[in-house]
Amino acid sequence: MSKVKYRYNPVSLSYDKIITTTEEKLKKWGIMFVASMVIAVVYYAVYSYFYDTPKEHILTNQLSNIRFNYQMLSQELEYIDGVLSDIQIRDDNVYRTVLESDPIPASIRQAGFGGVNRYQPLEGYLNSDMMIAATRHTDNILKQLYVQTISYDELIDKAINKELIAACRPAIQPISNKDLTRLSSIFGWRTKHPTLGVSRPHNGIDLTAPTGTDIYATGDGTVVKAERTFGGYGNLVIIDHGFGLETRYGHMSKIGVLKGSKVTRGDVIGKVGNTGDSSGPHLHYEVRLNGRPVDPINYFYEDLSPDDYVRMREQSENNDILETW
């Protein structure tokens, strides 16, 4: 049973019963409802300011984990950067130096990606800055790794070629000369040709030896000429070693190889003689690089120490008595 309320009437000096209409009741209830909602909103706002909701708490933990993982990823990427930098330094200053290759320019190693903005799809998110930074860092490492892979492929090819070049490059004396007394004429300009009596360049060196002394191929290669010539070289063998290198062996008494033959360093290719433009038994030996005569003594590195090289030069300075070719 609802409470009955009365109001004192000073005119009639009595209490009149208060009758509340339905409209007044609805209005009162509406005011109370609105007031309650306002209080609830204020309470929620104050509570939310000082305390996270369960959903916000979960999102906060997830964000903390993301930031922690990003920091760990950044540290790993920095470590990879350091390792990659060390590899690049060794590549430029050790491997490429040994294999006679130019270092890779930093502009190529550090080159970025051109074209449109690669990271536009990552923009507009709460953690876009972290995602873009990590992705850009990773892309930079991947680009440098790609360049390094290409570099190693190049160096592998050069190493294989270098081994082949080492076998083909002239590297020994063409006759036995352990006491270093065989050299009679050195490479360079001669003030007087021993048989013609005029000044002419000497495109090789002369090594004296008895007729019939073995002549050796100084490097691996293919015989491109093995024939008797009239005047000049006399009996001549020319070996193509590849890579622009060629050796010539003149004045032989006997040719021991055929044109087209494959020879290996140390193979006997003929005998010392006195054929052609010669004033005594000896071997005229030339090395040509890309068609240009060069000093053969510089290609005796498997036979001569630095001291031996000096001795060989000194003992030949005043002993220029044979041919000029």
Image (cartoon, grey):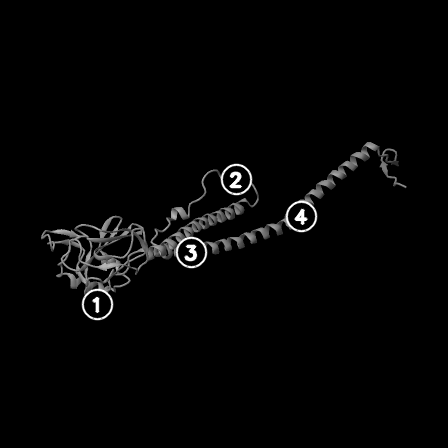
Q: Nearer the viewer, residue 229 or 35?
A: 229
Of labels 2 and 3, earlier in sequence is 3
Q: Residue 139: image x %, image y %?
A: 49, 47
Of labels 3 and 1, earlier in sequence is 3
For the residues marked 3 and 4, what is the alpha-carbon distance in whole angstroms? 47 Å
Tell me if I can see residue 51 in this picture.
no
Tell me if I can see residue 149 in this picture.
yes
The answer to whether the residue labelled 2 contacts the one labelled 3, judged by CB atoms less than 8 Å apart, is no
Mark 1: amino acid? Asp
For the residues marked 4 and 1, what is the alpha-carbon distance in whole angstroms? 94 Å
Residue indicated by mark 3: 87
Name the residue at the left extreme. Answer: 197
For the residues marked 2 and 4, what is the alpha-carbon distance in whole angstroms? 29 Å
Decide: few, some or many residues near mark 4? Use Cα within 10 Å; few <14, some 14-19, many ≥20: few
Q: Nearer the viewer, residue 110 or 159?
A: 159
User: Could you say whether the residue bearing mark 1 is in a helix, strand or loop?
Assistant: loop
Task: Tell me what residue is drawn at x 36 percent, y 51 percent.
Answer: 103
Task: Tell me what residue is drawn at x 81 percent, y 32 percent.
Answer: 23
Mark 4: amino acid? Lys
